[in-house]
Image (spheres, grey):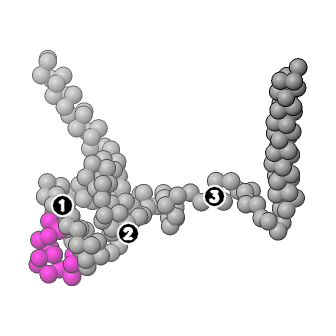
């Protein structure tokens, strides 16, 4: 009975693992193996991976992932171009990844490329953060600038008056 329960548990867990969508499996592999050098839409150490399946065949991608330097040394023009476009930084070999693993990574990249809005700025633009934000302009907002300098001048005059009053109190206290 114990063996039947263990066997059923193993079968069910493997079925659940197989039932997860390819992009989820690809995401886990991408985060663990690829994310340190690659992004979907931005070039990091390695190229941006969005559209990789349109630029190269699945077989070429698997061969490149397994051993990029082997492809480069064989004179593959696409591999050499990728190598030179990325400052001749060699991609580590991943011979343990199966073709299905690479296909799952590609599925994840395709899904992420659809979900992400490509923005060339490395930060969120101010007009997106505050829709009605407009910076001050000397020609248009001179009244605000005049009020600001007026308040500063008023504070300076007040402080000088207080210093003079205090010094008069000290002089009066010395004379008494």
Q: CA distance from mark 2 to mark 3?
A: 29 Å
**Other residues around mark 3 within 10 Å, as few (<14) / some (14–19) / many (≥20):** few
Image quarter where the N terminus lies is: top left
Residue 121 x/y as whole percent: 52, 64
Relative side of 82 to 164, left or right: left
Residue 114 x/y as whole percent: 47, 61
Residue 141 x/y as whole percent: 83, 62
Above or below residue 148? Residue 66 is below
Q: Name the residue rendered at 49%, 61% in the picture.
A: 122
Query: Residue beneath label 1, please?
Result: 92
**Other residues around mark 2 within 10 Å, as few (<14) / some (14–19) / many (≥20):** some
SS of the residue under disc 3: helix
Q: Name the residue rendered at 11%, 76% in the picture.
A: 73
Above or below residue 7? Residue 151 is below
Q: Earlier in the sequence, mark 2 or mark 3?
A: 2
Q: Which residues are magenta?
A: 67-80
């Amino acid at each position: 009975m114990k063996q039947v329960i263990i066997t059923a548990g193993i079968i069910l867990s493997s079925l659940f693992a197989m039932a997860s969508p390819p992009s989820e499996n690809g995401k886990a592999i991408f985060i663990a193996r690829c994310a340190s050098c690659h992004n979907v839409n931005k070039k990091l150490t390695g190229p941006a991976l969005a559209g990789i399946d349109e630029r190269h065949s699945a077989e070429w991608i698997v061969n490149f992932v397994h051993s990029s330097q082997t492809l480069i040394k064989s004179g593959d023009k696409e591999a050499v171009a990728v190598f030179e476009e990325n400052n001749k930084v060699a991609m580590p070999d991943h011979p343990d990844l199966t073709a299905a693993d690479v296909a799952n990574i590609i599925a994840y990249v395709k899904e992420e490329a659809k979900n992400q809005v490509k923005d060339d700025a490395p930060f969120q633009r101010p007009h997106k953060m505050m829709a009605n934000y407009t910076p001050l302009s000397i020609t248009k907002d001179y009244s605000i600038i005049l009020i600001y300098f007026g308040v500063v001048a008023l504070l300076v005059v007040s402080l000088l008056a207080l210093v003079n009053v205090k010094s008069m109190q000290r002089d009066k206290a010395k004379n008494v």
